[in-house]
């Protein structure tokens, strides 16, 4: 019936196919330019005010999460998607990346990125290593602005070692801050 989860999923899939390509390109351009509020409004118009289609959910929620008043909605959206699709590495990575956006959740995000790189949730088997490396390096750069707090230094050294071990290279921008 119309209220069933299967019906709603089919309806979202049909809506995704019929999305305006020019509107989608415009939303992405606005996001790249840092005009996040305009990008979110464009995405919401494209999605007809309902839940984003799965193929656009990650980019939408990461854009929404960049807004000061959108972070919690983005976190809830990605958490819900992750629970529905635990095998989807893109969603797990996006949620971990989103958590690095805020100081109060940054350590949680870095820990999640580390698990995705080497832990039991390891993405490297299924995804290119660069998918994990860039968000982790970015989060460490944010931690290293100015003088990193003492508690963060051992964590940053461990993560740098992880990045070197996994990717065979040094992240000098971050290492220079230690």
Image (tube, rainbow, N blue to C red):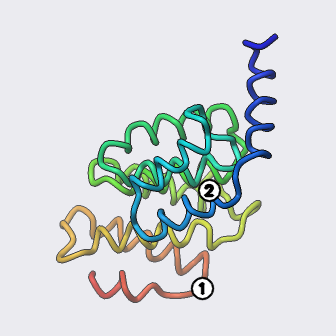
Which mark is in front, 2 or 1? 2
**Number of numbered tags placed on the structure image:** 2
Viewer-proximal residue among 151 and 57: 57
Calculate the distance from the C-alpha at mark 2 to the C-alpha at mark 1: 40 Å
Viewer-proximal residue among 94 and 169: 94
Q: Is residue 76 above or below residue 32?
A: above
Viewer-proximal residue among 103 and 35: 35
Q: Any mark on residue 136, and which? A: none
Residue at the spot x=44%, y=69% of the render?
159
Q: Is residue 31 above or below residue 83?
A: below
**Earlier residue among tags 2 and 1:** 2
The image shows residue 38 at horizontal and vertical percentages of 42, 55
Examine the image and state in which quarter residue 81 appears: top right
Q: In this view, does 167 lie above or below 71?
A: below
Q: In which quarter of the image is the N terminus?
A: top right
The image shows residue 60 at horizontal and vertical percentages of 54, 50
Dot 1 lies on which element?
loop
Relative to 95, is 131 on the left or the right?
right
Residue with the mark numbered 2: 23
Residue at the spot x=55%, y=53% of the render?
94
Mark 2: give few (<14), some (14-19) or many (20+) Cα within 10 Å.
Answer: some
Report if the CB atoms under discs 2 and 1 are less than 8 Å apart.
no
The image shows residue 5 at horizontal and vertical percentages of 74, 20
Residue with the mark numbered 1: 168
Mark 1: give few (<14), some (14-19) or many (20+) Cα within 10 Å.
Answer: few
Residue at the spot x=51%, y=60% of the render?
114
Examine the image and state in which quarter residue 178 appears: bottom left
Viewer-proximal residue among 112 and 41: 41
Dot 2 lies on which element?
helix
The image shows residue 176 at horizontal and vertical percentages of 31, 88
Relative to 176, is 96 on the left or the right?
right
Relative to 120, is 161 on the left or the right?
left
């Amino acid at each position: 019936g119309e209220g069933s989860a299967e019906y709603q999923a089919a309806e979202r899939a049909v809506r995704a196919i019929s999305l305006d390509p020019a509107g989608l390109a415009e939303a992405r351009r606005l996001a790249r330019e840092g005009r996040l509020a305009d990008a979110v409004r464009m995405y919401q118009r494209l999605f007809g005010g309902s839940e984003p289609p799965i193929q656009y959910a990650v980019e939408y929620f990461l854009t929404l999460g960049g807004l000061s008043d959108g972070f919690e909605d983005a976190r809830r959206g990605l958490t819900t998607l992750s629970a529905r699709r635990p095998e989807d590495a893109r969603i797990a990575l996006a949620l971990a990346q989103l958590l690095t956006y805020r100081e109060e959740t940054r350590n949680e995000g870095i820990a999640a990125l580390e698990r995705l790189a080497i832990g039991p949730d390891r993405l490297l088997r299924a995804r290119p290593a660069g998918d994990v490396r860039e968000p982790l390096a970015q989060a460490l750069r944010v931690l290293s602005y100015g003088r990193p707090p003492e508690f963060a230094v051992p964590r940053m050294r461990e993560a740098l070692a992880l990045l070197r071990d996994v990717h065979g290279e040094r992240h000098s921008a971050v290492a220079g801050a230690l």
